[in-house]
Amino acid sequence: MVRDGLARDPFLAVEQHFGLELSLMPAGQGNEECSCDGTLDRKTGKIRVAETPFSRRSFFTCLHELGHFLLWQKEELLSRIYEMDKKNAGRVAEERACDAFAAEILVPESLAEEVTSGQRVGAQQFLELFGRSSGSREACAVRLVQHLGCEGHVMLARPDGMAVFTASAGPYVVSRGVPRETTTSPSWLGALGGHEGRPTFASEAVGGGRCGAMPSVMVGLSALCWPISLVGRSRV
């Protein structure tokens, strides 16, 4: 089946089943407005994905760009996306739709429900979801934010607090490269004793609201995960 092929090897499936041409490019050359480091040329059907040391991340980016391609084949869907997000001419809604499409392929909803059932979403759930699925950290972040239960973010960031990827619930958007406030961002790897390639986990209680205190902070392979309640308004 097409879905199984996309989950197993997105690069191969995108070329075989959709006739698209896929190539790799150096990191940092993607569209700055895109949540992933990749590009899609709709006229030529070419997808370019940033080379990364983590194949899971490349797979997520590939599927995200495929999501853009599929959306642009359906005028009705594009119109609905625009209506949902007139303020941004549909751009933010389209990015979130493509993120959700990639996460749907790589991280089964049934697994996400099992991992988060009856629990406040936090770093431990992120770790378990990543360990039990073939999804990238980005895909797991998207899945977790769908179960956050309030407006907020699940953020992957470098040790210096610079956002690499952020999945959001609610009207707020965090772009790639946005720094976390320096007044609240310590040197994470130094403070928590982390080492490159050796995940370190710690908990931190900050804030409040519908989601309770800010869930755990996860540090792993030079990345952080912050499931954050910004305003604490329930979505359920």
Image: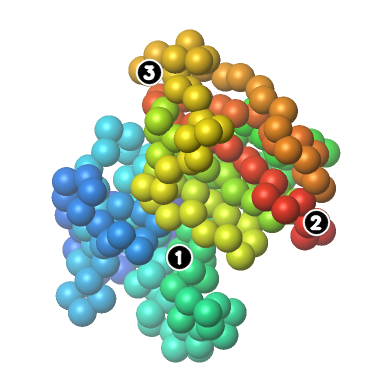
The correct choice, above or below, for 56 with respect to 23 in the image is: above
Nearer to the camera, 105 or 58: 58
Q: Give the residue pinned by disc 1.
A: 95
For the residue marked with disc 3, what is the amino acid? Gly
State the image coordinates of residue 193 (x, y, percent, origin top left).
Answer: 48, 11
Q: Give the residue pinned by disc 3.
A: 197
Q: Is residue 140 left or right of residue 121?
A: left
Nearer to the camera, 149 or 186: 186
For the residue marked with disc 2, what is the amino acid? Ser
Nearer to the camera, 129 or 186: 186
Nearer to the camera, 13 or 191: 191
SS under mark 2: strand
First in residue order: circle 2 vs circle 3: 3
Q: Is residue 60 left or right of residue 99?
A: left
Query: Rounded to the nearest whole Å, what is the CA distance between mark 3 and mark 1?
Result: 30 Å
For the residue marked with disc 1, what is the amino acid? Glu
Q: Residue at x 38, y 80 (%)?
A: 72
